[in-house]
Amino acid sequence: MLTLADALEALTNVRPIATTVITEAVIDSRQVIPGSLFVAIPGENVDGHNFIAEAFRRGASFALIQKDAGTGTSFRSLDLRSVSSADSFTREDLVPPLCLRVDNTVSALQQIARYWRRKQDVRVIGITGSVGKSTTKEMITEVLSTRYRTLKSPGNLNNEIGLPLTLLRLTTGHQRAVLEMGFYVPGEIAFLCDIAQPQIGVVTNIGTVHAERAGSQEAIARGKSELVQALPPAPEGVAILNFDDPWVRKMEEKTKAHVFFYGLSPEANLWADNVTGLGLEGIRFRLHYRGETLHVKIPLIGRHSVHTALRAAAVGLAEGMNWQEILEGLNQGHTQLRLAAVRSHNGALLLDDTYNASPESMLAALNLLDELEGRKVAVLGDMLELGSYERSGHEMVGLRVAQVANVLLTLGTRAHMIAEAARRAGMKKSSIIEFDEFDPLMSWLLANLSREDTVLIKGSHGLRMDRITSMLEARS
């Protein structure tokens, strides 16, 4: 495990005699466990330096700081900004609880993570893409864990702070690490790769998520391709690319790693056909690889999930696993993170997919709704951060709604574009109801749902549409 000596060597290039173990690195004092390193990060609204006392009270051994601790505190502090030799440290200096003073706590966290990653004999799998990163991460972990001791990034810790925190959880026992890599601005994924040093890169797709910040799909593709550019040359490096996405397919030209294509085309290295949605029972499909055909049924919901399974299988193959191990991992069934199927107070089936929304994930959710029985009610909210794709993205969803749903309820100002497109596509005006406020929408649902209904609830996280499921369930 990471020790104080490792952290100090990473920050000063000087290794003292210090065997105190750092159990975990955290940025939230509420997550401190005994032996933690608390990283005090000054933010726009909350300054971590004001919670140093709380972190120590909960058992933290050390705190990374870049300014004096909060008012009224007087913790021992070791200034690391001018350390030149091991003589700079004494045993008395290094006794916890202790603050470690640096110029910038985020940079220091990254520096420790970079150092620690390079000390570990572990293969790292990096995952990026517009949609499906988290589910892909979970399924790859399920597959790899049938043979290897595998670390994964928890939740959506996929940025310049979250990824280093995950890497500091590595121990000498880990053989594989599966890390999400998010993209908001050019250079971000390249920076994360410099810290994590991935040998395998998986790209899911290029959509319009965060187009408002990143720009065009071309700019998004350029940013995501930083992952495959950072991979080592073949045979050590492997780029696992979605053959069905033209933007991802073109990334073959940007890497020296071995390219492994997955998709629904026989031109891919690993491909699937005869994909059948089984509703909430999962999906069935045929898997093809090097002339071999396997008949597969897995518990992931929705036909689009075949791509998730293909990614995980591709990583397993790249890591030398056999089909028995890979299929065992695919069938674990622990991977459906975002979409939850529950019953309302009066028996309606609620498909809660409210974690976030983009045109691509909206269409996938509507395809699942299409597989199910009963009166199909689509409750759809605004999709945020689409930039120049805002109108076309909402309209694309509206066209699909008209093909799938019996009733459309929209929430928010942008979602009116979904309703407009659905009307133009021939959906009855009486079947479309538009809401700008949450409460009237809830009133309609409470009054009009029946046990024969299947209800898809989806919108960007900022709309907090998860409240709909909570309130409908609360009456049970």
Image (cartoon, rainbow, N blue to C red):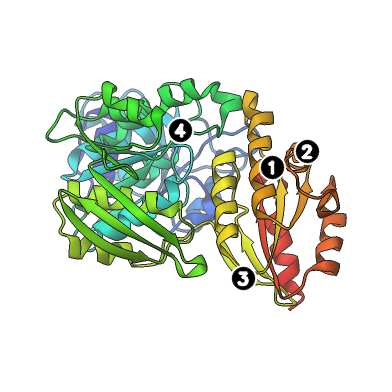
Instruction: Identify the secondary structure beneath mark 3.
Output: strand
The location of residue 77, given as percent across then percent down, is 42, 37
The location of residue 292, given as percent across then percent down, is 16, 55
Closer to the camera in the image, 239 or 378 = 378
Callout 4 crowding tier (Cα within 10 Å): few <14, some 14–19, many ≥20: many
Horizontal side of 316 relative to 407 (left or right) equals: left
Q: Closer to the camera: disc 2 or disc 3?
A: 2
Q: Are marks 1 and 2 in contact (CB under 8 Å)?
A: yes
Position above or below: 156 against 218 = below
Sequence order check: which comes first, mark 3 or mark 1? 3
Q: Are marks 4 and 3 in contact (CB under 8 Å)?
A: no
- Report the Cα–Cα distance between label 4 and label 2: 26 Å
Q: Closer to the camera: disc 4 or disc 1?
A: 1
Q: Are marks 3 and 1 in contact (CB under 8 Å)?
A: no
Dot 4 corresponds to which residue? Answer: 206
Closer to the camera in the image, 21 or 90 = 21
Dot 2 corresponds to which residue? Answer: 420
Dot 1 corresponds to which residue? Answer: 398
Sequence order check: which comes first, mark 4 or mark 2? 4
Instruction: Identify the secondary structure beneath mark 2.
Output: helix
Q: Closer to the camera: disc 4 or disc 2?
A: 2
Callout 1 crowding tier (Cα within 10 Å): few <14, some 14–19, many ≥20: many
Amino acid type, callout 3: Val
Res. 342 mark = 3
- Report the Cα–Cα distance between label 1 and label 2: 7 Å
Sequence order check: which comes first, mark 4 or mark 1? 4
Amino acid type, callout 1: Gly
The location of residue 92, given as percent across then percent down, is 30, 44
